[in-house]
Amino acid sequence: TTTTTTTTTTTTTATTMAATTTTAEGRSAGARARVSAFVPPVETTETATTTTTVVSTTTVVGTTITETRTTITHTSTTLTTTTSSTTTKTHTGIGSLPSLFCFTETQDSGDQLDLMRIQLAQRRGVFACNDWAVFSIEEVWLSPGQYKTIPVYGSASKIVPVPGHPDSKQLLNTAYFMRMWDVIRDRGLAKKTEWTIKSDPDAMFFPIRLRQYIKHHSLDSLSKTYVLNCQPTNSLVGALEVLSRPAAEAYADGREFCMQHLDWEHVPEDQFGQQCLQLLKITPFAGWTLVDDARCAGHNSVPCFGDHTVAYNPFPDVASQFACMEALKHTNGVSLESLQE
């Protein structure tokens, strides 16, 4: 985002000069950056008062958030003129493709953390989005000295009875994801992008295909929209949850209302999410070709097949994900590089 504001005013005063520079440091998942600027005073005999403020902000969740502000003030003598202009540029993604904020979660160790570290090194999955965040119970390194997970303290899941089957139990992580959404809202992590995406850690997710999918289907990022992805049950499966920014904001703000009206403690996170979005009257889009998920009846029996599928699920370890990439390469002629854009 770039904002430039210029104001020129003339007054009758003695000649003075000042130059100030301030730098604000921002941070995300372990990354830091400092930017400083120096504006030397320049002697002049012009008769005007000029104040120029330039604000340049670069936001990349998982990389840096840096703001540099430079103010130059010069005052001398003569008549009065005032000029004001403002230019604003918004974050619009890659070329004409939509911009994405993507998040996922990982365990503090084991296969999921290995997957996150390899995906980061290869710039795959959520790391190929414009902005990204990875959550975990405890803060852990994704890349030593550079990127860390965002801690969401507390239990990741709990065992609860299956509704209608008191002798059966299920492991649910709905409350865990509620806390992630709190962090996303409170930190404004998804404010700069057009779409908010939640991906499972064991999903083979390709953001470039999602950008193309959104553009091809002319999905409106300014309306409250989310994508259903399992046709047999007309439902949303959690491997890939796609929400426009207005829909994500409505969901983040409306979850407490939903919790008061839904049995959220006894349903999976994705089921609660769909029920809540329905309760909030968010418009669904039928994206039946978006995801190939083994949990959705009628999914493709040949894993990692097709050149338009946005996510394949589940592939819970490094070996299975590499096998999926090999299948994509041999059956569709897909290269890793083409999926890292």
Image: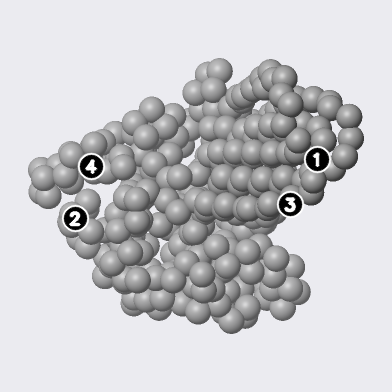
Q: Earlier in the sequence, mark 1 or mark 2?
A: 1
Q: Which mark is residue 78?
A: 1
For badge 1, the amino acid type reads Thr
Q: Which mark is residue 82?
A: 3
Q: Residue at x 53, y 19 (%)?
A: 144
For badge 3, the amino acid type reads Thr
Q: Mark 2 vs mark 3: give the one in front.
A: 3
User: Rounded to the nearest whole Å, what is the CA distance between mark 1 and mark 3?
Assistant: 13 Å
User: Rounded to the nearest whole Å, what is the CA distance between mark 2 and mark 3?
Assistant: 57 Å
Q: Mark 4 vs mark 2: give the one in front.
A: 4
User: Rounded to the nearest whole Å, what is the CA distance between mark 3 and mark 4?
Assistant: 51 Å
Q: Where is residue 278 shown, x and y percent of the image?
A: 57, 79
Q: Residue at x 71, y 46 (%)?
A: 7
- In this view, 264 is above or below 91: below
Q: Which mark is residue 279?
A: none
| Mark 2 neighbour class, 10 Å CA radius: few under 14, some 14 to 19, many 20 or more | few
Q: Are marks 3 and 4 in contact (CB under 8 Å)?
A: no
| Mark 3 neighbour class, 10 Å CA radius: few under 14, some 14 to 19, many 20 or more | few
Q: Earlier in the sequence, mark 1 or mark 4?
A: 1
Q: Is residue 48 visible?
A: yes
Q: Earlier in the sequence, mark 2 or mark 3?
A: 3
Q: Mark 3 vs mark 4: give the one in front.
A: 3
For badge 2, the amino acid type reads Asp
Q: Where is residue 90 shown, x and y percent of the image?
A: 52, 53
Q: Nearer the viewer, residue 115 or 310?
A: 310
Q: Which mark is residue 338?
A: 4
Q: Residue at x 39, y 41 (%)?
A: 128
